[in-house]
Image (cartoon, coloured by chain):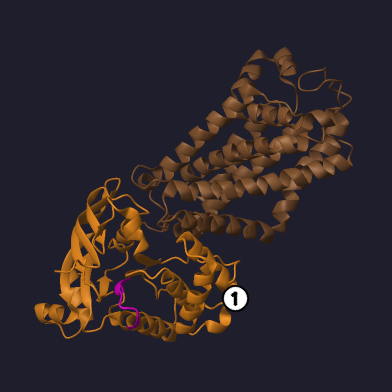
């Protein structure tokens, strides 16, 4: 049996007395597009901070491609591509310089980094913006650059935290299409955190997170059957037992 | 990871810091203007007030400008150390720090790379200052310009590590003003940068003892002696020891498994 791309076992995390994650367990299968669905404050960003080791895991376990984050952190991080909710590009550097810096941080030499940068920027239709300052790109273009940069070191799992926040409808659709395409073209697995139910496809795997608890996991289709809802939005509302997002 | 990969990573961190420095020309200018104002205005006015007796490493009577030059060099490094700490707080708020911390290289190595990069910037500033001072007829022995280089490196590392430690303790960018008041000014004024310690002792023994335990005093003395091709073992021991302690503190504070970041909660991850 193949190990999952991401495996969370009994993960809990608190900020002082407030518990942000409560005994969270789930798996992201290899090659899956898995949506982590939850309202703001559900614990999605906390989970991301734990997966990316920005926070220490104090309870439970996390493994990326079978590498335990506590025991083999460097091996796990090497297989992980991350797009955070807040932008992490250096606005004063050019697109190429941002890529070069990221490549260096992964020990990738200049020649290899240049070739991969061109290839990835072409894939996100920004091949002609190589020497532009990031500051001069639109919000949607910056997001595409960040996604391309996250793929530079050829990770096996891409995790994205609300990557479409603040983008218009067209840019949102472009980003979704791009990332879904990566599963086929790069053979990778994706964990996509969002609070927008219209970003979920029937074939996607879904993890419903609410107030730090996992309320449901399974394919979007299975959740519809389980709740008897007409669409994923209704299913989500039923599962969390609150008003619509 | 191979040794070559480590070298690529270190080069990348230094390159980015250098680029950032070049983009902020005003940072370079202000880093030089500050000590030059002290040199040209403060020292010119003060030289009549304060007589300097012959104290090691000087072998003759010296002008006040000559006396405060090592202190001003250390001041450049102090501001630079705090500035790179400011840039780390900024990086954290802007999210750039996450890019660094997501690297699969050991965290101590990444932070050490940051330190080296910041130190190189401060060393270049020091030499630019020495050049201007030389044009102003403040000359050290020719060999001194070479022997002071390791001192610059060590002091740069110590103050950079202190800045890094502070940056891991500061929660938000706005709090950085406090660092100016509670770290930079007390460190600078309670040291041998502006006045010899025997003078301070005459005025107030208490302030003298505070100056003695201030690592910045020893940073100034290490530079002062090295600039005159001499080695000050006590200053070296204090600066070296403090560098290790600050560096270790910074690494621990940035370590997610033990550090303060977890306890305080990293920015942007409160949901």
**Chain that bears disc 1:** A
Residue A188 magenta: yes
Relative to residue B101, is residue B216 drawn left or right?
Answer: right
Q: Quadrant of the N terminus of chain B?
A: bottom left
Instruction: Tell which of B70 and B3 is nearer to you.
Output: B3
Q: Position of residue B251 (x, y in %)?
A: 44, 42
- In the rendered structure, the colour chosen for chain B is brown
- In the rendered structure, the colour chosen for chain A is orange
Q: Is residue B118 above or below residue A124?
A: above
Q: Is residue B126 above or below residue B89?
A: above
Relative to residue A11, is residue A195 drawn left or right?
Answer: right
Residue B146 magenta: no
Tell me where residue B47 sits by quadrant. Answer: top right
Relative to residue A6, is residue B180 drawn left or right?
Answer: right
Looking at the image, which residue is at 45% across and 46% down? B108
Q: Which residues are magenta?
A: A185-195
Instruction: Tell which of A48 and A96 is nearer to you.
Output: A96
Tell me where residue B209 sits by quadrant. Answer: top right
Relative to residue A20, is residue A129 drawn left or right?
Answer: right
The answer to whether one can see residue B118 in this image is yes
Q: Is residue B19 above or below residue B142?
A: below
Q: Quadrant of the C terminus of chain B?
A: bottom left
Q: Position of residue B96 (x, y in %)?
A: 50, 60
Label 1: element kind: helix
Looking at the image, which residue is at 68% across and 59% down? B22
Looking at the image, which residue is at 16% across and 66% down? A215
Q: Position of residue A229 (x, y in %)?
A: 14, 82
Looking at the image, which residue is at 56% across and 31% down? B240
| Circle 1 residue | A136
């Amino acid at each position: 049996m193949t190990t999952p791309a991401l495996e969370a076992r009994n993960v809990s995390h608190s900020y002082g007395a407030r518990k942000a994650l409560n005994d969270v367990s789930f798996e992201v299968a290899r090659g899956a597009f898995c949506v982590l669905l939850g309202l703001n404050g559900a614990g999605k960003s906390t989970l991301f901070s734990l997966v990316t080791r920005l926070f220490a895991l104090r309870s439970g376990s996390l493994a990326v491609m079978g590498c335990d984050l506590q025991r083999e952190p460097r091996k796990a991080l090497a297989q992980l591509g991350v797009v955070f909710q807040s932008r992490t590009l250096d606005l004063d550097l050019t697109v190429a310089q941002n890529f070069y810096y990221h490549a260096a941080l992964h020990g990738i030499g200049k020649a290899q980094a240049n070739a991969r940068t061109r290839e990835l920027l072409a894939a996100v239709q920004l091949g002609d913006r190589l020497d532009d300052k990031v500051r001069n790109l639109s919000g949607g273009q910056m997001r595409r650059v960040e996604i391309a940069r996250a793929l530079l070191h050829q990770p096996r799992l891409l995790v994205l935290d609300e990557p479409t926040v603040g983008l218009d409808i067209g840019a949102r659709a472009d980003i979704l299409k791009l990332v879904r395409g990566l599963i086929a073209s790069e053979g990778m697995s994706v964990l996509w955190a969002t609070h927008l139910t219209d970003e979920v496809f029937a074939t996607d795997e879904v993890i419903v997170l609410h107030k730090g608890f996992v309320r449901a996991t399974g394919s979007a289709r299975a959740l519809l059957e389980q709740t008897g809802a007409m669409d994923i939005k209704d299913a989500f509302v039923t599962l969390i037992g609150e008003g619509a997002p | 990871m191979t040794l070559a990969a480590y070298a690529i990573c270190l080069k990348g961190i230094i390159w980015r810091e250098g680029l950032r420095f070049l983009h902020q020309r005003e940072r370079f200018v202000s880093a030089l203007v500050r000590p030059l104002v002290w040199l040209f205005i403060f020292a010119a006015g003060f030289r009549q007030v304060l007589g300097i007796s012959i104290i090691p490493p000087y072998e003759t009577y010296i002008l006040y400008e000559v006396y405060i030059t090592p202190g001003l060099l250390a001041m450049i490094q102090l501001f630079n150390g705090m500035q790179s700490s400011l840039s780390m707080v900024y990086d954290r708020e802007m999210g750039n720090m996450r890019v660094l911390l997501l690297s699969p290289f050991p965290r101590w190595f990444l932070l050490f790379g940051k330190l080296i990069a910041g130190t190189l910037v401060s060393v270049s500033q020091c030499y630019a200052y020495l050049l201007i001072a030389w044009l102003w007829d403040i000359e050290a022995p020719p060999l001194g310009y070479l022997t002071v280089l390791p001192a610059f490196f060590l002091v740069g590392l110590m103050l950079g590590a202190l800045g890094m430690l502070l940056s891991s303790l500061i929660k938000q960018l706005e709090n950085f003003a406090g660092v100016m008041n509670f770290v930079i000014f007390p460190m600078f004024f309670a040291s041998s940068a502006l006045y010899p310690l025997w003078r301070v002792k005459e005025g107030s023994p208490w302030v003298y003892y505070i100056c003695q335990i201030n690592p910045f005093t020893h940073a100034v003395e290490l530079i002062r002696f090295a600039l005159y091709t001499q080695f000050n073992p006590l200053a070296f021991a204090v600066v070296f020891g403090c560098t290790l302690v600050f560096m270790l503190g910074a690494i621990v504070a940035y370590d997610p498994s033990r550090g303060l970041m977890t306890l305080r909660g990293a920015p942007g991850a409160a949901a």
